[in-house]
Amino acid sequence: MTEKQEQASIVKLLRLIGAAVYVLGTTRKRTDFHGTMQTPGIPDVFCYLPRPKHGGEYQVWGYLPMWIEVKAAKGRLSPAQVRFRELTQAAGVRYYVGGADGLAVELRALGYLR
Ligand SMILES: [Mg+2]
């Protein structure tokens, strides 16, 4: 799957479990440098996960913020993305990088999916 397809699956999965989803990343052609005007390192998706239905680590919380950097297989974080992840995790906020299958595993562990 391409990164664009992974992102579409991720957004669908998050909406399925009732998350409030905000897409920041826009997919561009490789040659398009007239970009988003966003600061480098900002992930592709931000969401607020609802309270898990099936128990799990975060059951007592109403909402769980999470940043998501979508990557297709073999995709790697840029230095700016690594820095954003460091700051996010240091602030105690969840940061996920990868594709839809890996996210499903993580959401299951958190109690959002059976
Ligand atoms: Mg990405």
Image: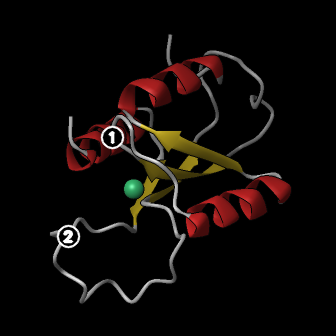
Mark number, residue 72: 1
| Residue 59 at x, y percent in the picture | 75, 28
Nearer to us in this view, 78 or 25: 78
Say which residue appears at 29% left-offset and 84% top-offset. Answer: 35
Work out whether 29 lies above or below 94: below
Q: Secondary structure at mark 2?
A: loop
Specify which label sits upstream in the sequence, 1 or 2: 2
* Three-letter residue code for mark 2: Arg
* Three-letter residue code for mark 1: Ala
Say which residue appears at 21% left-offset and 42% top-offset. Answer: 2
Left or right of residue 5, residue 98 in this image: right
Left or right of residue 61, residue 16 in this image: left
Which quarter of the picture shows residue 5?
top left
Q: Secondary structure at mark 1?
A: loop
Say which residue appears at 63% left-offset and 48% top-offset. Answer: 95
Q: CA distance from mark 1 to mark 2?
A: 15 Å
Q: Quadrant of the N terminus?
A: top left
Nearer to us in this view, 105 or 51: 105
Q: Residues within 10 Å of mark 1 (few under 14, many from 20)?
A: some
Which quarter of the picture shows residue 41?
bottom right
Mark number, residue 28: 2
| Residue 50 at x, y percent in the picture | 58, 40
Q: Ligand 1 is in which quadrant of the figure?
A: bottom left
Work out whether 98 lies above or below 44: above
Say which residue appears at 65% left-offset and 24% top-offset. Answer: 110
| Residue 69 at x, y percent in the picture | 48, 52
Which quarter of the picture shows residue 22?
bottom left
| Residue 106 at x, y percent in the picture | 57, 25
Q: Residues within 10 Å of mark 2 (few under 14, many from 20)?
A: few
